[in-house]
Image (cartoon, coloured by chain):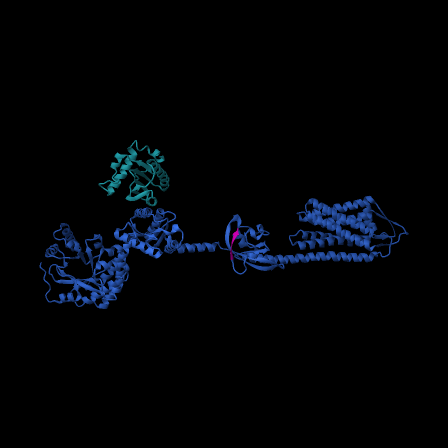
Chain colours: A blue, B cyan
Amino acid sequence: MIRLYECVANQHDLRLVAIAAVICALGTYSTFAMGRQVFCNIALKERLAWAATGILATSTAIWATHFIAMLAFEPSLAFGFSVGQTIASFLVAVLLVGLGAGTVVARSDLPGRMVGGAVVGLAISAMHYTGMGAYHVQGTLQWDLSTVTWSVLVGMALASLSTILGFSPRRRVRRLAPAILLAAVCGTHFLGMSALTVVFDPRVEIPGGSLDGTVLSIIVANAALLIVGLSLAALRLWHVNRQRHEAESQRLRDLADIAVEGLMICDGNTITGINHSLERVLGLPREALIGSPLQRILPGLAVEHIPTAQEADAVLRGGNEASIPVRVIAQTITIQAKPHTVVAVRDQRERLRAEAEMHRLAHHDALTGLANRHQFNAALDARFASRRAEDASFALLILDLDRFKVVNDTLGHGMGDELLRRVAKRLLCALRDEDLVARLGGDEFAILKAGGVDLAAIQALAERVIDILARPFLIDGHILNIGTSIGIALAPTDGDRAEVLMGNADMALYGAKEEGRGRYRMFEASMNARIQARRSLELDLRRAIARQEFELYYQPQVDARTGAFDGAEALIRWHHPVRGMVSPAEFIPIAEETGLIGNLGEWVLRTACTQALSWPEHLTVAVNLSPVQFRDGRLATTIRNILAETNFPPARLELEITEGSLLQNEQRTLVILRELRALGIRISMDDFGTGYSSLSYLRRFPFDKIKIDQSFVRRTPDDKESAAIVRAIAMLGASLGMKTTAEGVETDAQSSFITGEGCDQIQGYLISRPVPARQIEALFTRPEPVALRA
Amino acid sequence: MPLHRLLYRSEVDLVGSAADVQQQIVEIVRSSEARNAADGLTGALLHTRGVFIQALEGPLSAIEATFERICCDLRHRRVELLELAQAEKRAFAEWSLARISADETMERLFPCLPSTEDQVVEATSAQATVRLMRALLVTSPTEAPAPQTLIRA
């Protein structure tokens, strides 16, 4: 130790020693700075470049330290350096430092670092003693071998320690590494120098061509500073560049993360970046995916196959192996002068859900969840289009609920809707899975029964459906008894096209309803003719108004006591050009069903008012209103307009309604009746005694007149029951302050009985058949009224 | 919540031997008991000569839901509602669903069973049926064990 001290302090120029130390410190600092770069997560090429720079900087520093320190060595004798060996010593340093660094890089575990560091230490000594070989002095060099050994060992040990500490996870410890490496360099050098004794020997000549110490020191110092300085500058630049780059990348990442759609950057088939949206869609963090092949999340898809012009459908494999339908589109961009691919990944789940919902809405009935008409027709068409033998024959059942309209009209749509929902559920219970049931609209349902046309099975199904829908429905305390009628058509015998089969099943349904509801009917070809006839009648009816085929007949009404005319009831007649006279009983129901009754009713009113205007002023005209006409909320307005148009006094108009009008929607009907009454029109209850004859109707609206149905009148006075009914109604009318009219009076006996019971008015064949307008006018304007035989 | 009682009759549409049918009915009763208990319903089921007569009592909404389920069940045929009315108190308060197997003499006592003379069920006969069902459960020592055992039957 003392020798070492003396060697440094007494034998060296301390200023030059300081310069050597500074160069060495810079060198060892750069060793670790570059070393870190080698372990950075950057491109291999860059890492190699940094490794070479590091090795060069370190070797240069060691080499320069040595030679500057050698200059500081003052043997008080002339000295010089041989060029060849000086260069050789530098190459030795580069070689061994490279070997040591390579060892550390190859094996960065503790033993690897120890060995690598030791090799670097060896590089210091090897360089030192090779360098000493280039040292020529006028004397002989004598070496103390044990100190030489120590110098080598100290260098290796310290260098080894520095590489161990240089990889410490603790920053403070890491910072010691350059200083220890510095100590290794200086230690080796000065221990080596202290092992040296120069003995003057004038015989020794410094060989020619040796470099002068001062020149060498300047060259060496400058070269070393240049190399180390440049390396450090490069490192600094690299860091600045990298920071800028990172800031830029961060900005790009932020931007990508804001994007709603999933984005991913691929280098070849390797994922190098993923944005937040895609992380969310995948349910995986980006750390788990960066570096993975693209196929990990897009199985079976190669980057070069992702289209760049139009999105392609693909399946994304997310966390939990979830398959997510997506669309992908790629775009090539340049990142760090390298082409990358940006893949946009659009999650299709929401869109597919919306589409499925739209599809469901388009194909299903929103109320019941059953298939709708559209879907059913499609299924039917598919059946007919199918070439499979088992699809060829099947049964089509069309259902229509009985009495549903009454529920809907009396208890409201809410109740009607709930009823339809329950009907749908029950239908599903009665069917097998392979049967298709649809709500075609309103209270009309259809069933496509698969599995051939085994009659027994079809009838069993029909019976099951009829049974299950005939069971009561209990809704909010109401007991609803509906039921269903079913029409059945079989494919392909009853129709080989959807429309034909539907039409025939409809016809069978019509037949079932005519037979009295709550039953099913199979289609028969003969149904066709009957229904065709009805259809043609319907067509004729539509044309009849325009062709003026209707005419009004009038049946007079007389005062039961005086026999004087009170007025007449207008009755419609249809002169069909081919069929002749068509009964109202035949065409009025059709007019009601088709809605033609509206036009027809208006025509009747207008015509009756116009024709009755020419009658004596005290006579009234009675016009029948159909229940269907009351569904039109503008009925009262229409009547008022007709009265205004024809200038007919409202007080002379009598409107006859039946219970049916009150049954369907009592509230609405009463509102219309009150409006009509306010105009001064009289209202009669027609056909009283048939139907429900509910007394509550009489209480709820103050009718002007009750007309006793002719079915009772005709049986009086012999039939006791009819007589009693007539008597009761007459009394009822009297007590409620309503007039009573007996219709269908045909005999004197009836007339006298009815008059005796207190009826106010008589109408019937006894007085007159219904006669055309011209005739009734003549009858009314005759000076002497027809006397009644009382 | 006013108490309601419902009485219906239906034809049994179960297939299999007599023992099979009996077994199926036991199953039906067992699952109905659990459901009824949860819904606050009590009642009794009489099975005889291919006919079910069942009484259900409890809140109206539970009765309606249960009856709708029965109406969706194809093990019944021709379900016919005999009575739905408010009741003062439960007639079968002790049983979620008591099963009654009437013997031949008992059958004659039931006005609601289909007979050649009278198909019409009046309100009085509905009430009479309920009373008879109750009487059968409570008094007959051979047919009806104590209520507790019957629940588990």
Q: Which residues are magenta?
A: A312-317
Q: Is residue B13 visible?
A: yes
Q: Is residue A507 covered in magenta?
A: no
Q: Residue furthest left?
A: A789
Q: Position of residue A76 (x, y in %)?
A: 86, 52
Q: Quadrant of the N terminus of chain A?
A: top right
Q: Nearer the viewer, residue A62 or A112?
A: A112
Q: Quadrant of residue A253?
A: bottom right
Place of residue A53 in the rendered image (x, y in percent of width and height, measured from the top left): 71, 55
Q: Nearer the viewer, residue A727 or A379?
A: A379
Residue at figure coordinates x 32%, y 39% from the top left? B43
SS majority, magenta: strand
Which residue of the protein is positioned furthest toward the top in this rendering?
B141
Identify which residue, A453 or B108, lies in the foreground. A453
Instruction: Work out whether residue A17 can be spotted.
Output: no
Residue A576 lies, in percent from the top left, at 22, 63
Quarter holding the C terminus of chain A? bottom left
Position of A320 with respect to A81 (left or right) is left
**Residue A421 position in % (x across, y down):** 35, 50
User: Which residue occupies the foreground of this view, B26 or A670?
Assistant: B26
Among all residues in the image, which is located at the extreme right? Answer: A203
Q: Residue at x 68, y 57 (%)?
A: A236
